[in-house]
Amino acid sequence: MLQTSERVRVFWAPGCTSCLRTKEFLTRQGVDYESINAASDPGAAEAMQALGARSVPVVAVGDRFIYPQKLSDIVEFLGLDAEAPERLGPEELVRRLGIVLPAARRYIRQIPDAVLDVKFRNSVRLLRGIAHHVFRIVEAFVESVEGQVELTNELIMDETERVRPGDDVLSYGERVIARFDAWWKAYPDKSCVSEMDTYFGRASVHEVLERTAWHSTQHVRQLLLVLETLGIPPDGPLVPADLEGLPLPEKVWED
């Protein structure tokens, strides 16, 4: 039961995986909210600035807001009578990334450059940028944990925003996979109970690892959607077992 009489506002953008997941979760909980497309609504930027919010998604009530990167934060913020799904263990999350990241490289290799270098559907960035983002999400996580620095939205997004037509995403992805594997082999706290600073608040490494895994996986699902749209059979498609237990949105893309 929603514990506020004020209208809930959700600021989102097309192609944003966290935005889609947030809206689906609120809909399942029966929350009536105002959906504000920050990429097209002329008043969105001013409204977000007034809140002090710098990135999407944002869930706001009055002058209060959160970055809803954890479903448990939405539950607490709105006072919902709901529970976030049980989290997969760290070793399993690492194993899943070991499946989806190489899959992303296979799918990117199948997509023609002419398609990679334009925007897919209503996306705010090039498809090549989305492909890059699959790996940057993981690299930023490792940089934050290893360097003991805050995982900011800028740390995650800045390099992706600089991607240009023709950039070599495949080699970049290969380097990120190697770096992530090396980090996990050397990381002493395999339970990932240590905490770290993020732009959405203090969180355990386990929580942020889950966010890293499902976020990258959702963008890989988007690459699969591109192949489907092009009529190209994927080289080794993901199977339901690869996705099971990850807190993914139901839909792949929001039009």
Image (cartoon, rainbow, N blue to C red):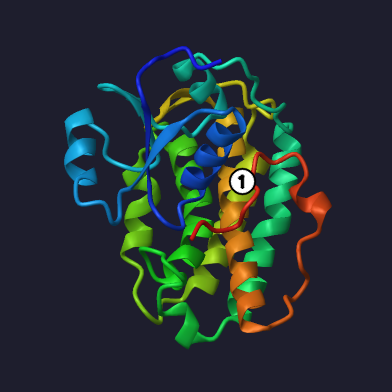
Residue drawn at (51%, 47%) of the image: 20
Residue 233: percent from left, percent from top: 74, 80
Quadrant position of residue 126: bottom left
Q: Do we see residue 87 in this rendering?
A: yes
Question: Between 119 and 205, which is closer to the camera in this rendering?
Answer: 119
Horizontally, residue 215 falls left or right of residue 122, namely: right
Question: Between 16 and 167, which is closer to the camera in this rendering?
Answer: 16
Residue drawn at (36%, 46%) of the image: 155
Residue 49: percent from left, percent from top: 18, 36
Horizontally, residue 132 falls left or right of residue 85, namely: left
Using the image, determine if residue 161 lies above or below residue 22.
below
Using the image, determine if residue 33 lies above or below residue 64.
below
Quadrant position of residue 21: top right
Mark 1 falls on what kind of element? loop
Q: Do we see residue 209 in this rendering?
A: no
Residue drawn at (64%, 25%) of the image: 84
Q: Which quadrant would the N terminus be assigned to in this image?
A: top right
Using the image, determine if residue 236 lies above or below residue 4.
below
Residue drawn at (27%, 34%) of the image: 53
Question: Between 16 and 156, which is closer to the camera in this rendering?
Answer: 16
User: Which three-letter amino acid code belongs to the residue tagged 1?
Assistant: Pro
Residue 181: percent from left, percent from top: 65, 50
Residue 179: percent from left, percent from top: 56, 53
Within-10-Å neighbours for mark 1: few <14, some 14–19, many 20+: some
Residue bearing the label numbered 1: 249
Quadrant position of residue 198: top left
Using the image, determine if residue 126 lies above or below residue 248.
below
* Number of numbered labels in the structure image: 1
